[in-house]
Amino acid sequence: MSNKSKSGDFNLDEELRSNIAANEEGTPISDDHEDEKIVEEKLQEDISEQGTSADLELDAKKLRARRMAEKKRQILENKRDAKEHAERVYKELDAKLAVLKKELDAAKKVVEDSESKNKRIAAYKEKLASLKSKYDSQKQTYLAEIKKIKQSVLANDIKDGKVYNVEKQLAQLKYEYDTDCQKAKIDSKSERQVKIDEIKAQIKSAIKDARKKVKTYKLTEEEIKYGISSKLKRRPELINSDVLLSVRNLKQFFFFGKGPSRTKLKAVSNVSFDVHKGECFGIVGESGCGKTTTGRSIIKLYDITSGSIYYKGYRISAGNRWNRKEIKFTNIRKKAKLKELRLEYTNNLKALDKNASDYDAKLNKLKQTYKNERYKAINFAKNIYYVQKEKIKQIKYDNSHCPRKLVNEIQMIFQDPVDSLDPRMTVEDIIQEGLRIQGHHNKVENHKKVVEMLEKVGLVEDHASRYPHEFSGGQRQRIGIARALVMNPQLLICDEPISALDVSIRAQIINLLNDLKDELGLTIIFIAHDLSVVKYFCNRIAVMYFGKLVELADSDELFKNPLHPYTKSLLSAIPKPNPITEKTRERIIYNPAEAHDYSVEKPELREIKKGHFIYCSPSEFAKYKKELVD
């Protein structure tokens, strides 16, 4: 209970006061004492009538004692109830006083804010008035001088040049006056509000420019045919070129586990290449180097982690991990920069001499410098946040609004025909499945297309009603090729289509793909282990190792000038049908730890010769250049 409640400053109701006073005097609170007096008198009369018996006196004493005890108990209970009631009242009053105090503080703060605002406005008005008076006085002086000069000119005393100079001074004065007025207006605002207004203006301007670009863009006939949105990201330099597919900084990571045990597998890391129309592009490397993952990422079987994939100049797939990391590390760099600025400001503040005459001027300059640098660091980070968030937004839009009709022009022949064909479906159903997904439900037309594709791959119409287990390995691979060709693709990804076949069957499949390429004008990405087959079939070859592209060149150039140690290792593993040379052939073993030292210089894909790229450091680049054979 507060001191106020103990001193009794608050006015309680009359009933509560009378009850407390009665309890303190020891008198009964209720009117029951009148009844007790009547009972007492009757008891005395009975005693006097019956005689003064010792037993009756004893009973009377006990009755009195019992009644007195009951009366005391009642008095104590009434005291306790009155005390509790008083405490509740005092607590409620204390709570009301606290609320009133908070409201009073808030009102005081509002009054103080309004007073400071009024002071700023008054200072602004006073500054404007002083500027205006100064301008008016100087203007009158200049006008008088101009008038005097003009009169002299009329008298042919001086040239017009002096009049021009004075008028120029007057214009300069007007400009300075307007500038000072604008500066005074800005000073009247808070510094924080001015910066917020600047940022808002920049954002509005950027949004306006982006909307103008979207509105002014006109869709071409091909974009209307595929249903491509004007907002979909595109690269105009690729749309009208012979580059059919462009892969840029492709990264495909797989994550395992949760929490501290979460691990990351970099299946493909920073792979970039272009595929031109009508060519056969080969990808070679050992098992597990990321060849198949690259093909599956291109056809959108995987959601890529980072990078972009462009088909016909339009982005069909993209990842945002790099953008999210850029936001994260920008935030870390911003915190470190602010901490550094704060430490520098503290040290400079301690170094100031408080007894110096220019202490205040130096302190203000130091504070202003700190504020400006802090503002620059925060604004720089905010700009990066805004740019990266817009890029992430665009990536999400591209992934969800890429037209299916465009992506359907990329098809894939899978490595294992047994796993890629549904054993519960007939060959006709397997090949027709893609057509039905595209919306072709005419059974007669679909059957004709299936028969046509089967004949193109060397099968007959009777095979359409059979199941995959009734065919040999080569025939099953032909069914997989027919299933891909029925979608009328322009880009065909062949994922090791001959690795599980016999040598004779391999030649048949390679010849079939060659014929189909010439007949249908296909562009092919050919993934394989066998370098001799790739040299025969492909125009350009890319060598992959541990998820990275280590060398890229024309097939003849790669076999003539293999520069990377891993490429040399692969070429040394090609068997030759000559038992004499095979006995003396030396197998080159590639060990990255011994072949490279990337602790100082970081490697990247560099063009060592026109069309010949190699993954190396600057020192290795100079070394490989000496090894080139013209």
Image: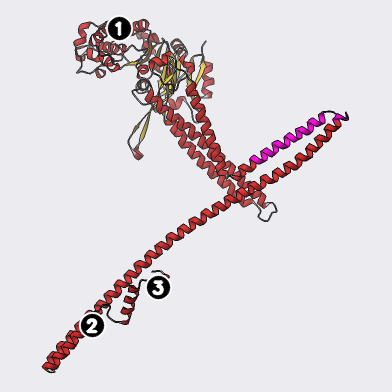
The Cα–Cα distance between marks 2 and 3, rounded to whole angstroms, is 34 Å
The segment highlighted magenta reads 153-182
Residue 68 in picture, x, y percent from top left:
22, 83
Q: Nearer the viewer, mark 3 or mark 1?
A: 3
Front one among 16 and 273: 16
Q: Percent position (x, y) of residue 206?
A: 52, 30
Q: Which residue is drawn at the image coordinates 76% and 41% (left, top)?
A: 138
Query: Residue farthest to the left?
Result: 50
Identity of the residue drawn at 79% across and 30% down? 164
Looking at the picture, which amino acid does disc 3 mark?
Answer: Lys
Q: Mark 2 to mark 1: distance in Å?
A: 127 Å
Of badges 2 and 3, nearer the viewer stands: 2
Is residue 130 rendered to the left or right of residue 75? right
Q: Nearer the viewer, residue 533 or 399?
A: 399
Residue 508's tag is 1
Does the magenta portion include 193?
Answer: no
Asked whether residue 155 is drawn in magenta, I would say: yes
- Residue designated by label 3: 6
Identify the residue shown where x is 67% and y is 49%: 361
- The first of marks 3 and 1 along the sequence is 3
Q: Marks 1 and 2: in contact by CB < 8 Å?
A: no
Q: Position of residue 357 (x, y in %)?
A: 70, 53
Q: Is residue 533 left or right of residue 195?
A: left
Q: Which residue is mark 2?
A: 34
